[in-house]
Amino acid sequence: MKRIGVFVCGCGINIAKTVDVKKVVEEIGHYPGVVYATDYQYMCSDPGQKMIQEAIEREHLDGIIVAACSPTLHEFTFRRASEAVGLNPYQCEIANIREQCSWVHQDKEIATAKAIKITKSIIEKERLNDSLSPISVFMTRRALVIGGGIAGIQAALDIADSGYEVILVEKEPSIGGHMAQLSETFPTLDCSQCILTPKMVEISHHPKIKLLAYSEVVNVGGYVGNFNVKILKKPRYVKEDLCNNCGECFKVCPVVVPNEFERGLGSRYAIYIPFPQAVPSICTIDADACLGLFPLACNKCKEVCEPNAVDYDMKPEIIEETVGAIVVATGYDLLPSEELKEYGNGRNPDIIDGLHFERLLSASGPTQGVIRRPSDGKVPKEVVFVQCAGSRDPEKHLPYCSKFCCMYTAKHALLYKHRVPDGQPYIFYIDVRTAGKGYEEFYHRVSEQEGVVYLRGKVSKIFQDGDGLMVWGVDTLTGKKVEITADMVVLATGAVPAEGSKKLFANLKLACDENGFLSEAHPKLRPVESLTPGFFLAGAAQGPRDIPETVAQAGGAASKVIGMFSQEMLLHDPIVAVVDENLCSGCKICISACPYDAREFDEEKNIVRVNELLCEGCGACVAACPSGATQQQNITDDQIREMVKVVLGE
């Protein structure tokens, strides 16, 4: 029989306040197989870990139980300490008596009894634990970054500057993301393009970065360290190595359509470059807008193309790459104004969102920085800014705060006042949130020194009223209704996951929260890591965030990739599923149940095999197997039965 030691943590008062730690030690000390039991206030501290190590050596322990907090927090800590003195790390188990016990009870007697049962159940598990060794994995030291906004750009540059190859995939014809659409950035009012463009250019010239713009990731197979990626490179119908961006093709193109980059406020030709600073600076033919490519209906752009770059016969191309790590930086979109019925359903051209207003402010925008009403081109003299348009509205729209809206609305009002000195900006707000360096000072400057009127309250309705817009709202500070006849309304619409990200995340098998944003492995200790090994998160794909936070997180994700690549080889957790060949009937039910594609059928032996490098130990196959042939290492049916018996007092 194993010699088992039990170490009960008081966790300050986190556990000790509700659980009688001494009583747990006394009860467990008499449990069969336990040869040593003790407690300490902070078991995860250095003295606590030394206490465990000394007991392992002195008592010749074969296994240990640490009754403390969630294994998510300190399982690695205690396993590493155990391994340092010769105990197999998989003979160290955590009994969660904090999150699953002390934190959910108030009655000390009930909590103590439950803590004892939880600890006993883990002892029963430990009795049947096997000593395991991590699975070694050789890796490809090349990274894939999905998304070419500021998050993807920063992550790609940081990884590449460390000497590792990077493949940067962007679905649009140019990198830059939404940051490229901004005029200035808060709170310093730096020109967005001035600080972004150098990084974009660096991407295009970096010897370690392969840029695949106008491309999409369509499939990812394999496992951490060795992902097999398929990338669809869409045809531009212009040869990238020949196009010199001379612009002659624009002059002869007969088709003019709304410009997506200008949010429809400007126009472009069917052959176009998204914006002047685009990277790569290569023309793209919009096949949907063109008069016709299949069959060819117009040949004018090809006729004037001196370098002969136009190629109507280009086809979609699938590029296959092997990478060791993937950074997901797919960004965000704004909640469509069409979903805001109370604000005109997006039908009135003078009710615009924040990105529309950014393009009006931009010197390179459709009005060269002159603020004009989209409907008639007049300069608006009264502008109403509506914050939380769709955000913090669990009944109708988005339940969460979109985080950066308060600050960009303040920036908009300030810049409007500078461009139209005799104009009057109004801001309807619920609360003003200024969580960033210099943000509070910027807000006070706008609200106290620049003539911007802040009205605390929600807007109930916006509708056409003659030549202008009628805005109905309420000022909750005075308790009075507010009616403003405005020339233009700017909605600070909520941030939502980027279009197409839901399908991509499902393809990558990445966990999302209830709002569709990516879920991190741990919000505090592993904020840039996914629950799926090898995937790292950056920017607004994980949730709304401003530029400084996005850049910092992108650097954090890059550092995780660099740290992984610096290892000689990867170690995969051995807590994986195994198949008993004598029991397997070859029914294949477990294959479809596996979310990680870790199971394959052996036609010769008529059994299922497990790819241990792909298996993440989720247990879905164990639940699906009708014959009991599939078991999880160190979480077998026998172990679970013994644990249940103890909990039920049998």
Image (spheres, rainbow, N blue to C red):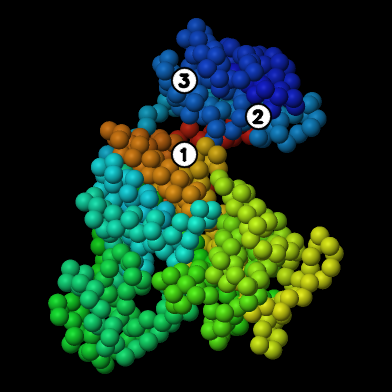
Q: Quarter of the image holding residue 135?
A: top left
The span from disc 3 to disc 2 (Cα, nearest Å) is: 20 Å
The span from disc 1 to disc 2 (Cα, nearest Å) is: 24 Å
Q: Which residue is mark 1?
A: 632
- Residue at 78% across, 72% down: 482
Residue type, label 2: Ile
The answer to whether 162 is drawn above or below residue 476 in the figure is above
Q: Residue furthest left?
A: 307
Q: Which residue is mark 3?
A: 81
Dot 2 falls on a residue whose secondary structure is loop
The tag earlier along the polypeptide, 1 or 2, is 2
Q: Residue furthest right?
A: 479
Q: Which residue is mark 2?
A: 97
Residue type, label 3: Ala
Dot label at residue 454: none
Q: Is residue 535 visible?
A: yes
Q: Looking at the picture, how far across and down is residue 593, in whole percent?
A: 47, 54
Dot 3 falls on a residue whose secondary structure is helix
Residue type, label 1: Gln
Is 57 displayed left or right of 494 in the figure?
Answer: left
Is 105 displayed left or right of 591 in the figure?
Answer: right
The tag earlier along the polypeptide, 3 or 1, is 3
Q: Nearer the viewer, residue 326 or 562?
A: 562
Dot 1 falls on a residue whose secondary structure is strand
Is 66 displayed left or right of 177 in the figure?
Answer: right
Q: Disc 1, disc 2: CB below 8 Å?
A: no
Q: Quarter of the image holding residue 560?
A: top left
